[in-house]
Image (cartoon, rainbow, N blue to C red):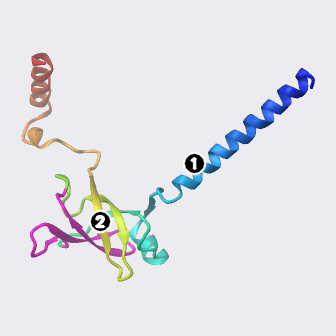
Amino acid sequence: MKAKHQRLVLVVIALLALIGAGLLAAWALRNQASYYYFPSQIVVENPPADRLVRLGGMVQEGSIETLADGVTVAFVVGDGEATVPVRFSGILPDLFVEGSGVVADGRYQPDGTFLAENMLAKHDENYVPREFQDMDEHQARDVIAETVEGS
């Protein structure tokens, strides 16, 4: 076989290997993908209960309720068009409050409840750490400078 044909065969084999690796990776990750839904989308599409999805929206005012076991929290997430009741057992993020943004990983149940396994609370662009809330900008910069110099 000529050298030119050998190179052509190697290129074809390499391309087939790359395509095979890509297909194998896609097949392996097909169930690992986490789909992101807003409340108005999840109500309409009703994803299967065995699929892990993300629900994002705003925690409705007055909806946070700690259940009798003391660990489970029930609340409602909305997007202005629809609302979804959510239940979460575990430690809530510090930024989780009524009216804040939240992203919950979990499974949408046939009864319309979202069972969250993991919670992420989002803050707005005006976020200030608790330690700096009562300080003006000059005082906060002084504290930061002292912290950096002390390290």
Is residue 150 or residue 17 the one in the foreground? 17
Callout 2 amino acid: Ala
- Residue 29 visible: yes
Is residue 3 or residue 136 the one in the foreground? 3
- Residue 79 visible: no
Residue furthest to the top in view is: 149
Q: Where's residue 115, x and y in %?
A: 30, 70
Residue furthest to the front in view is: 1
Q: Is residue 86 left or right of residue 44?
A: left
Q: Which residue is disc 1 drawn over?
A: 25
Could you tell which of marks 2 and 1 lies nearer the N-terminus?
Answer: 1
Q: Which residue is disc 2 drawn over?
A: 116
Residue furthest to the right in view is: 2
Callout 1 amino acid: Ala
Q: Is residue 136 above or below residue 35?
A: above
The label nearer to you, 2 versus 1, is: 1
Is residue 90 or residue 28 the one in the foreground? 28
The answer for how far apart the CA atoms under marks 2 and 1 are is 27 Å
Residue furthest to the bottom in view is: 111
> What is the magenta range?
63-92
Q: Is residue 27 left or right of residue 119?
A: right
Q: Which mark is residue 93?
A: none
Q: Where's residue 133, x and y in %?
A: 11, 42
Task: Tell me what residue is drawn at x 9 percent, y 69 percent.
Answer: 70
Q: Where's residue 90, x and y in %?
A: 18, 61
| Res. 65 image quadrant | bottom left
